[in-house]
Amino acid sequence: MDTASKSWEQKSLIGEIIEGMELAQQLRLSLSTTSSSSENTEFLVQRILTSYEKALLLLQLSGSPQTSNVDAIANVPPESRMSANSSPRGDDYNHRSFKDQQELQDVSKKRKIMAKWTDHVIRVSSENGIEGSHEDGHNWRKYGQKDILGAKHPRSYYRCTFRNTQSCWATKQVQRSDEDPTIFEITYKGKHTCSHGSNSVPPPPSPEQQEKKRPKHENMSQPQQSQGNQMSFPTNLRVDTENLEGREKMASPFSFTSTSFGCMMSGDDFLSSMFDNDNFFSNISPSLLSPAAGESNYYLEPPSQMRNIALNEQLSESDLTEILSANNSSTNSPIPAMDFTLDLVEINPNFPFDTPGFF
DNA sequence: AAAATTTGACCTAG
DNA sequence: CTAGGTCAAATTTT
């Protein structure tokens, strides 16, 4: 009950923070890569900030017990965002299953919310031999493969493993580059609504090699925890984020960009500016924003459903500590209502936090 | 046995 | 009709 929801918040929060961390690392990598486009970095920055915003929100919410977490989040947006987006269930395949009578209704509903989901492409190249490196921290299940006209390699389709359990409609497509077999273009569609931001089971990263699935030269002797999945980007792995969701959204990212990391701005300013930002709340629960969503009554499943895959995972200690200490040094804890007790230790005894002044 | 992948059929937009 | 995307049964992997 109480404990349950609490831990739900904690999980979400931690998930967000971790994601932000990972993204930050990607950004760093991207920055160090000679060929990083500003678009690319901007995109990453935006995502990072999003994560932190959400985390902050969660903190806020957990501070004020009145509001029921999610609802609160959904309502928070005062008047700024959701101008052009808020595109819930834009899924493409709801045709087959019930095309009897529901279809009609569904269609009318769909018209309303038909917009498109986030969509971005990144190019990943593993120039060394590190395949399976592309782990984005999510669990994907392959559901199809298609030969594409003119492309030498087939395109594979993945969707979130938790699609059914948590109605997470995120999907991605992976296409190997024609000439450079080392480069994969990964197109992400939709946002993850599942509770597995990046922490979850050790992802057996094996995106797209149907031709040669490298056996496992694995060593399961890692004394520590498994770790090393997503972010352990080998230095020669290039991630190239490219597009985007063609919208003006990217035009003016944020006002608090560069500052936010080293030392976020102080309290109120930060919070208010984060509300000014846009569309994030819209992804939190599409269904909340558009009741029309229909059949699914199971978005945001009850806490009970999420097992405790919580966070006993793999954050590379070194990195984590790095970031934490960085924050630490900046000393001003920006969050006003920061009484949140994040007992990571309880959740995960092995958690690498040695940082004394953690938070 | 359960979960994930393969793969050809099926569906829809253009 | 074609190409791209998805389904779902069969198959493989865990």
Image (cartoon, coloured by chain):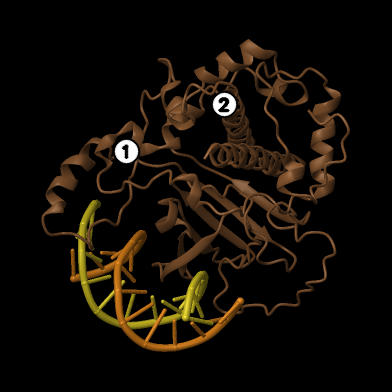
Chain colours: A brown, B yellow, C orange
Question: Horizontal placement of A289 versus A235: left or right?
Answer: left
Rendering coords of residue A27 (x, y %): 69, 40
Spatial separation of the CA atoms under disc 1 and disc 2: 26 Å
Type of amino acid at the residue the image marks with label 2: Leu
Determine whether the residue tagged by mark 1 lies in a helix, strand or loop: loop
Q: Specify the quadrant that holds the C terminus of chain A.
A: top right
Residue A40 drawn at (x, y percent)? 61, 39
At horizontal 70% and vertical 38% (from top left) the residue drawn is: A24
* Quarter holding residue A183: bottom right
Residue farthest along the front direction in this orientation = A1
Q: Is residue A333 visible?
A: yes
| Residue A107 horizontal side relative to residue A333, left or right | left
Q: Viewer-proximal residue, A127 or A111?
A: A111
- Residue visible at 70% across and 34% down? A342
Q: Nearer the viewer, residue A93 or A182?
A: A93
From the top left corner, tell me how far across and down residue A98 is, in percent.
19, 59
Residue pointed to by mark 2: A57
- Does residue A35 lie above or below A143 as drawn? above
Compared across the picture, whether A156 is left or right of A345 comes to left
Q: Amino acid at mark 1?
A: Ala
Residue located beneath label 1 in the image:
A115
* Mark identifier at residue A269: none
Q: Earlier in the sequence, mark 1 or mark 2?
A: 2
Disc 2 chain ID: A
Q: Nearer the viewer, residue A306 or A96?
A: A306
Left/right of residue A87 with respect to residue A269 in the rendered view: left
